[in-house]
Amino acid sequence: SDAVGILHQRGICQQTSAPIELVASDVLDHYRTYSLLEKLLHSPPKLASEQLAFQIEPQTSQ
């Protein structure tokens, strides 16, 4: 995606020692999360009443 290309040009991989695949995965995760929240942002009362569940990998939750 364009966002991954821009981050790569700005040297994010060198700064964080992260492979480009990890950066791309992270960017796509953020886009997916925003896409889930976007419809709720148009109706704030729904945002408070909706219960969103996000999967967390076991090693992350420890």
Image (cartoon, helix red, strand yellow):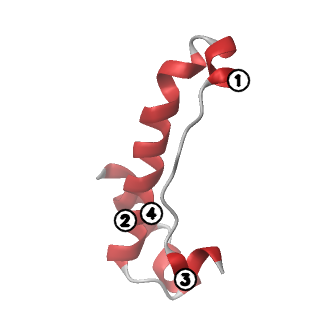
For marks 2 and 1, give the CA distance: 28 Å
Q: Position of residue 4 (x, y in %)?
A: 37, 60
What is the CA distance from the residue labelled 4 to the residue labelled 2?
4 Å
| CA distance separating discs 3 and 2 | 17 Å
| SS class, disc 3 | helix
Indicate which disc, 1 or 3, sits on the residue closer to the N terminus.
Answer: 1
Which residue is denoted by mark 2 in the rendering? 25
Q: Of the residues tagged 1 and 4, which is closer to the observer?
A: 1
Q: Is residue 34 above or below residue 19?
A: above
Mark 2 in CB contact with mark 1 (< 8 angstroms): no
Query: In terms of secondary structure, where does tag 2 sit?
Result: helix
As drawn, the label of residue 26 is 4
Looking at the rendered image, the disc whose residue lies closer to the viewer, 2 or 1, is 1
Give the number of the mark in front: 3 or 2.
3
Identify the mark nearer the N-term, 3 or 2. Answer: 2
**What is the distance, in whole Å, between disc 4 and disc 3 at their CAs?**
17 Å
**Mark drawn on residue 48:** 1
As shown in the figure, which amino acid type bears the numbered disc 2?
Ser
Q: Are marks 4 and 2 in contact (CB under 8 Å)?
A: yes
As shown in the figure, which amino acid type bears the numbered disc 3?
Gln
* Residue drawn at x 50%, y 67% as measured from the top left: 10
**Residue in the image at 59% along x and 20% along y:** 41
Q: Which residue is mark 3?
A: 59
Three-letter amino acid code at the position of disc 4: Asp
Can you give x and y, in whole percent of width and height, for residue 47 in the image?
Answer: 64, 23
Residue furthest bottom in the image: 17
Compared with residue 33, is residue 22 higher up or lower down, i.e. above or below? below
The residue lying at 62 percent from left, 74 percent from top is: 61
